[in-house]
Image (cartoon, helix red, strand yellow):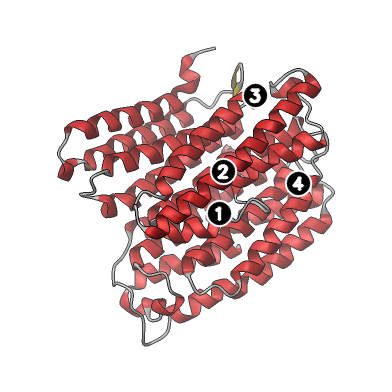
Amino acid sequence: MSPLALLPELLILAGAVAGLVTGLFVARDRQRVVAWTNGVALAGAAAATTMNPETMAFDGYVVDRVTNVTRLTVALATILVICLAAGRARGDTRESELYTLVALAALGTITMAGAGDLLVLVAAYLLASIPAYALAGFAKDAPGTEAALKYYLMGAFLGVLMLAGVTIAYGSSGATAYPETRAPAVAAVLLLAGLLFKAGGVPAHFWVPDVAEGASRPVAAFVTTVPKIGALAALYRLASGVFDEPALLAVVAAATMTLGNLAAFHQDNVRRLLAYSTVSQAGYLLVPVAVAGRTDLAEPALLFYLAAYAITNLGAFAVVATAGTDTLADYAGLARRSPWTAFALVVCLLGLVGTPPTAVFAGKLLMFAAAWDGGYAWLAVLAAANTVASVFYYLRWIRPVFAQEGGAGESRTGAVALMAAAGSLVLGIAAGVVLLIA
C-alpha cells in the first residue's frame, strides 16, 4: 500500500490547505495567487493520474479505472471552474475561500468515486457536500441565501437517510466494505437517496433549479456538474456488487430523463433551463449504471459520457457567465455581437442534445449500446425518444442567437466557453482513440 497511489488526492488537499493559508497573509487585491495555487495542484493531480494508471487497492479505497477517469475529469473540470470564477471574484473579501471551497468539494467528489467502503462513502459525501453548501450562498445575497438553505436542508435530510441505509446494510451483512456487503432493497433505496441528491436525479432533484438560479454563475456551473461525476461513479460501484437488485435504477433513470425534459420545455430563464437539462442528463448517465454487471459496455459508456457531459455542460454555463444575462430574450443577436461566444453556445447546446461530432454524441451511442446489450432495450428506446424531445428546448435558446436585432447581453468572448466547446469537439472526434487508450 504505497501513499503514491493517493498522490492526486494528496496534491489537491495540499493545494487547498496552502491556498487557505496563503490567503491569510496576502493583500486583498493579490489573492489571485490562491487561484493559481489550487489550479497548479489540480493540474498536478491530473498529471499524476496519467502517470500512475496502475490499479492499487487500499482498505476502503479503490484506485482503478473508474477512480482514475474521475480524478482526471474532476481535476480538469475544476480548473475550468476556477478560471471562470477568477475574473468575477477578484477583490472579494473572501476570494481565497472561494477557490479553497471549490478544491475541497472536488476532492470529496473524487473520494466518492474511489470509495470501497460505505463509511468512506459517507465521509466523502460530506466532504463533497459541505463546501458546496457554503459556495451556494457565497455571494450573501437573497437568492443565494435561499438557494443555500434549500440545498443544505435537502442534503442533510437525504444524507441522514443514506446513513440509515449504511446501518441497515451493515446489520444485514455484518460488513461495510463493498466486497463483503450486500444491501437489501430497503438499504438500497436509502443509499440511493444521498447519491441521487448529489447526481441531481429524481426524486432528489428539486434543489437543482433553485441553486442553478440563485447561486453565482461559476458556482452554479460547478455544483450542477462536478459532484455529479463522483456520485454516478459511486452508484456504479454499488450497482456492480452491493445492491441485491439494481433494476430499480432503470426506473429511476427513466423517470429522471423524462421529468427533466418535461420541466425544461417552457423555461425562459436559461439557468433554470440548464438546471433541468442537467437533471435529464443525469437520467441518461444512470442508464449504464442500471446495466452495471450485465454488460461490459456499462463502464466505458458511463466514464466517457461523464467526461463528455462535464466539459459540455461547463461550456454552456460559461457562456451564461460571459453573456451576463439569464433571460432567453437577451440572447437575441448574440451571433452578431459576439460570434465566438455564439459559436461556443451552439456547440455546447447541440452537444447536450448529442449531435455529432461532439463528445456527448459518442457518449450517448455507448449508452444506447450498453442499455441494449444489458437487456434494457425499452430504456434505450425511451432515452432516444427523450433525446429527440430535448431538441425543442435547446433550439428555443439557439434560435434567438441568430436574430438580427435585440439583446441586452454584454459583447464579450469567454475563453473558458471556447475551450470547453473546443474540448467537446476534440473529445468527440477522437472518441475512438480515447476509448482505446482508456
Q: Nearer the viewer, residue 317 or 54?
A: 317
On residue 207, the disc is 1
Q: Distance between the Cα atoms at labels 3 and 2?
A: 20 Å
137 versus 243 height, above or below = below
Cα–Cα gap, marks 4 and 2: 20 Å
> In the shown orientation, is residue 377 left or right of residue 229?
right
Q: Is residue 432 above or below residue 410?
A: above
Residue at the spot x=41%, y=43% of the render? 134
Which numbered disc, 4 or 2, marks the residue closer to the eye? 2
Name the amino acid, label 3: Asp
Pointer 2 with pointer 1, Cβ within 8 A? yes
State the mark number for residue 155: 2
Q: Is residue 229 visible?
A: yes
Name the residue type under label 1: Trp
Q: Which residue is mark 4?
A: 249
Q: Earlier in the sequence, mark 3 or mark 1?
A: 3
- Secondary element under disc 3, as helix, strand or loop, is loop
Residue at (75% x, 46% y) in the render: 249
Q: Quadrant of the N terminus?
A: top right
392 to 302, vertically: above or below? below
Sequence-wise first label, 2 or 1: 2
Residue type, mark 4 in image: Leu
Circle 2 crowding by C-alpha within 10 Å: few under 14, some 14–19, many from 20: many
Disc 2 element: helix
Tell me, for residue 117, which label it has, or none. 3
CA neighbours of label 4 inside 10 A, class few (<14), some (14 to 19), many (20+): many
Picture residue at 36% right of the left edge, 48% below the top: 138
For residue 108, side relative to residue 117 (left or right): left
Quadrant in which residue 116 is drawn: top right
Q: Would residue 355 be seen by someone viewing this image from the given angle?
A: no
